[in-house]
Amino acid sequence: MKQLGLLLIIIGFLFNNHVIAQDELNVLATGNNNWLYFSDVSNSLYNYLSGQAYELLEKRARQTAKLNSLSEWQSRQEWLKETFADVFGPFPEKTPLNAKILRTIDKENFKIEHIVFESRPGFFVTSSLFLPKKRKGKLPVIIYCSGHSAEAYRSAPYQQSILNLVQKGFIVFAFDPVGQGERMEYPDPETGKSKLGGPTREHSYAGAQAFITGSSQAGYMAWDGIRAVDYLLTRKEVDTERIGITGRSGGGTQSAYISALDDRIYAAAPECYITNLTRVFQAIGPQDGEQNLFNGILRGLDHPDFLTVRAPKPALMITTTNDFFSIQGARETAREVSSVYKAYDKPENFSMVEDIEGHASTKKNREAMYAFFQKHLNNPGDPNDEEIVLLTEEELRVTPTGQISSSLNSETVYSLNRKEAEKLLDKLNLSRETEDEHISSIIQSAKTLSGYRQPGDPGEPLFTGSIQRNGYLIEKYFIYGEGDYPLPYLLFIPENRNNKMLIYLHPFSKATEAAEGGEIEWFARNGTTVLAPDMVGLGETGPGNYRGDAYIDGISYNLWFASMLIGRSIVGIRAGDVNRLVMLMERKLKPAEIYGFARGNMAPVLLHAAVFNPSFSGIAVVETFSSYQSIVLSHFYNPAFIHSAVPGSLKAYDLPDLAAALAPKKLLILNVTDAAGEKMDAENVQKELSVINKVYSAKNAGENLNILSVEDVNEMQVQLREWIK
């Protein structure tokens, strides 16, 4: 026992020393020197993105508040149709559906036809058509969209609505969204579950790849719904003038999208989704990849627009007061949408129902939905919610194996997006043949797509403390970044300076390599003054409380979606802050040369900053992924790389293009990795980074470029010494 006690004391001592060592490198909170003003500093990035979103949404609100006449609303509707077509699209040409009825299930009052159709060639959609047996002539049909349930429309709450609609004389067509039901895109054969952990992650993992190509998960999913309407028009049982759509949660999202895009849908009743984006940012934050449109807020879009664009066709908002989709936002949206219906003199065609419940279906809301469709699709009857007998898993199975991946070898959002990416890469390679024009164009494209903003005066730094070490002094400062958030940094000042300065970026924090014996010390002991900051969202300024529903391997995809919605990128914001720090170094320390060094996920930040700023004499990047191309072309990639990606970038440039644009400056690239974070072999490195070699060679600057693989720290230090000498 005495030995155990002694061991615990030693462990505690070592742990406390480690904490103290880390604490002493803090700029904003160290010992007794705490800045209470920055008590919420870890949420800096989300707060800054939110602030920009609010400004854009307020601008939109001011514009819509001015609309009064029918002609003004109709002009907005036309603008919305064009904008929706752009942000969801471009949609492909319609190809043969090749629909097949795989199974038929016969029940007492209805039958189910299990159907597979192709919304795109080889992209199979599993679905079920519920047909009432007692019917005369053609019947109205309801498209039912499933929320984020792994079982999709087979889950009990969705069956409750579907089977009640069937009993009331409606045909119901339910289909599986991608990533759900029998359309799992990342199935684990051993467990039968998603390798990623569920629908929201499946939507976001592939959706992030789609955003990099300038496409979207929302576009792929909405197109499935449009093609579902195409299929219904082929059925003799369906009255094509009486088509409705509904769905809850993620199904509310889909029903809002599809009805906004397809004029053939007459009545729409999205449930537990519609609110407004101001309240989304204030309450839960942007959700999974499906629920975000490319640059949607920047383009002037918000939830009311999904209903406004289809007025005066009937619409019902189904809400609950305790939903995580803000009821306040829903009420505000209802007020806005009611204005356009009043302008059409059709106020009776729009309504909102709410019940006291969380994010769930309620009897009151279901009955309101039944009554809505009974009225507007001219199918009168009893709106009471009836008890139903749940269908079994076997009765609702569509494909032989229960998954299209094994039954039909279907395309996926990843594989379809990969094909689109390959087309973009062909164009990019063609552009690279005209080197000077290409380099000139990609610099402006990178600024625009990354949302980079030229930094202004960095102001005076605030000094918060210092640490004396053998051979160098560490001073602690912060300035303000692009927004009202601090950029804490450590300044390593050697006793024997060589008038060179290095900005050092680490993907974890400024303190990661700042301990005695760390990488930063090596530079300082070689005479180089080093500035090591915490970029916004990292170290002392992150990661914050916000994770979202697509938190994969410790990475908040939702935070990245937030930046994309407003036309920014985390990379672009951080690159601006890097150059703000460079301006400060030039003014305060007046170094003869400025270099940049970045590890891992910070390399894209440094590449963007250095291309936009002529002050850099050279940069070095270590253990970084090769390109955005590699992320998009890989079925499985490292989620940690997503915050370093720029939405839409592959339409104009990739990371090797930025590196090439640095020529003839010194450029050192060590230990390139693939999209999974594994070290790449020399052949693939040369292939992916060939544009860099080509441009440096054309500028007769080959001696300033080194792309190498090193095996240990000593070998790396040899290369760094040669690079910065």
Image: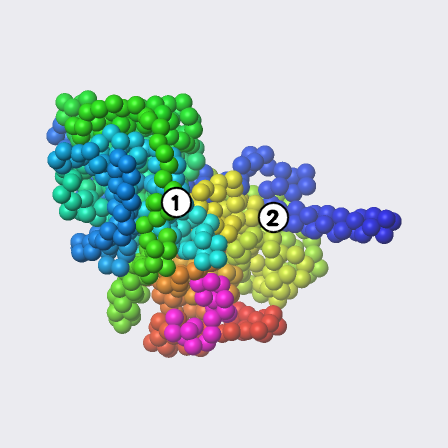
From the viewer's perspective, tell me whether residue 165 is left or right of residue 540. left
Residue 38, quarter of picture:
top right
Which residues, given as a range, are shown in magenta? 668-688
Residue 173 position (above or below residue 376): below
Residue 22's spot in the image, x, y percent? 65, 49
Q: How many marks?
A: 2
In the rendered structure, are the residues bearing label 1 and label 2 in contact, judged by CB atoms less than 8 Å apart?
A: no
Query: Distance of mark 1 from mark 2, alpha carbons?
Result: 62 Å
Residue 260, quarter of picture:
top left
Residue at image location 27% in from the left, 67% down from the top: 426
Question: Which circle's residue, 1 or 2, is located before the other in the chain?
Answer: 1
What number is the disc on residue 476?
2
Work out whether residue 44 or residue 224 is closer to the camera in this orientation and state it.
Answer: 224
Q: Amino acid at mark 2?
A: Lys
Work out whether residue 638 or residue 485 is closer to the camera in this orientation and state it.
Answer: 638
Work out whether residue 243 or residue 564 is closer to the camera in this orientation and state it.
Answer: 243
Q: Mark 1 Cα within 10 Å, few/some/many (few <14, many 20+)?
A: few
What number is the disc on residue 393?
1
The secondary structure type at the circle numbered 2 is strand
Residue at image location 27% in from the left, 72% down from the top: 433
Choose mark 1 or mark 2, whichever is in front.
1
Residue at image location 22% in from the left, 24% down from the top: 381
Residue 304, quarter of picture:
top left
The colour style of the image is: rainbow
The verdict on residue 640 being magenta is no
Residue at image location 19% in from the left, 47% down from the top: 231
Name of the residue lying farthest toward the front: 108
